[in-house]
Amino acid sequence: MTEAGPAPEKRKRGAKKSPPRFSREQADVRRSMLIEAATRCLSVGGIGAFTIDRICKEAGVSRGLINHHFESLDGLLVEVYKSSLYASVNNQIAEAKRRRAEASDWPPEASLAALVRSNFSPEYFSRENLLIWLSLWGEIAVNPRLKEAHRELYDAYRAELAEDIAAVAVLRGRQVDAPALARNFIALVDGLWLEWCLDESVVTPEAAEAAGFEMLEGQVGPLRGV
């Protein structure tokens, strides 16, 4: 029988514990990395390329890392939807709410104009989003989890847009069906963006933005230049 080695030293009372292997910041970075990799898979191969194996290969990670950060593939798909298609608009909504809270004298026309322009920013109004949009639109129809997320995001966006429209209308003494106008504006943006992606000779981003403003200005008055 071999001689036993020295007994391990007991941890001294009050000694500091070792720091966690991965900080919260590192976890957030890894999570964002997975969302970006999943988005690239979707943009190149559509919903058929949105698989665990394909995403792992794109991100250069093991399956376990995806399972650690997302409870399911649907959960990852929802995060891709939020970050890819609503990031620009949601950032503008957050900015509008912040400015209204901090500066009561910020005119509602400025808020509405900024929200309109956010729909036509290069990061949102881009051809790179075409396959992502088409893939997710098709999946929304058959995926209850994604449909629920879409409804939540769409309702929040439409409500904020309607609130800004109503504020401008009240200020100018106009009678407007703000929710209906907000809905129609969103549909116009989606349609113009799709037409531009499929055939750039049909419309330019600048013309699309002008059309969006014209729809709203027809009912609430001038917005450009505020």
Image (cartoon, helix red, strand yellow):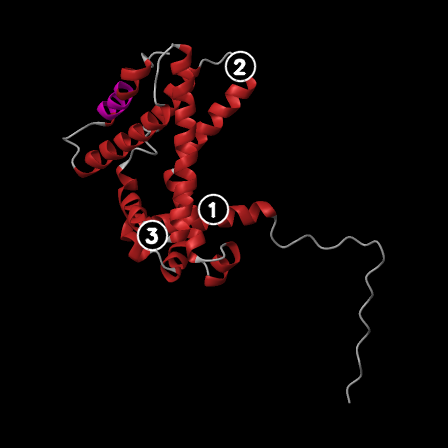
The answer to which quarter of the image holds residue 196 is: top left
Which residue lies under the disc numbered 2?
104
Q: Nearer the viewer, mark 1 or mark 2?
A: 2
Q: Is residue 95 left or right of residue 3?
A: left
Cα separation, mark 1 vs mark 3, equals 14 Å
Residue 36 lies, in percent from the top left, at 41, 47
- The residue lying at 36 percent from left, 23 percent from top is 178
Q: Is residue 158 above or below residue 71?
A: above
Which residue lies under the disc numbered 3?
41
Question: Which mark, residue 32?
Answer: 1
Which comes before the other along the chain, label 1 or label 2?
1
- The residue lying at 26 percent from left, 21 percent from top is 215
Q: Can residue 180 be seen in this view?
A: yes
Q: Give the range drawn in magenta.
A: 206-214
Residue 30 lies, in percent from the top left, at 50, 50
Q: Can residue 37 be seen in this view?
A: no
Decide: few, some or many residues near mark 3? Use Cα within 10 Å; few <14, some 14-19, many ≥20: many
Cα separation, mark 1 vs mark 2, equals 35 Å
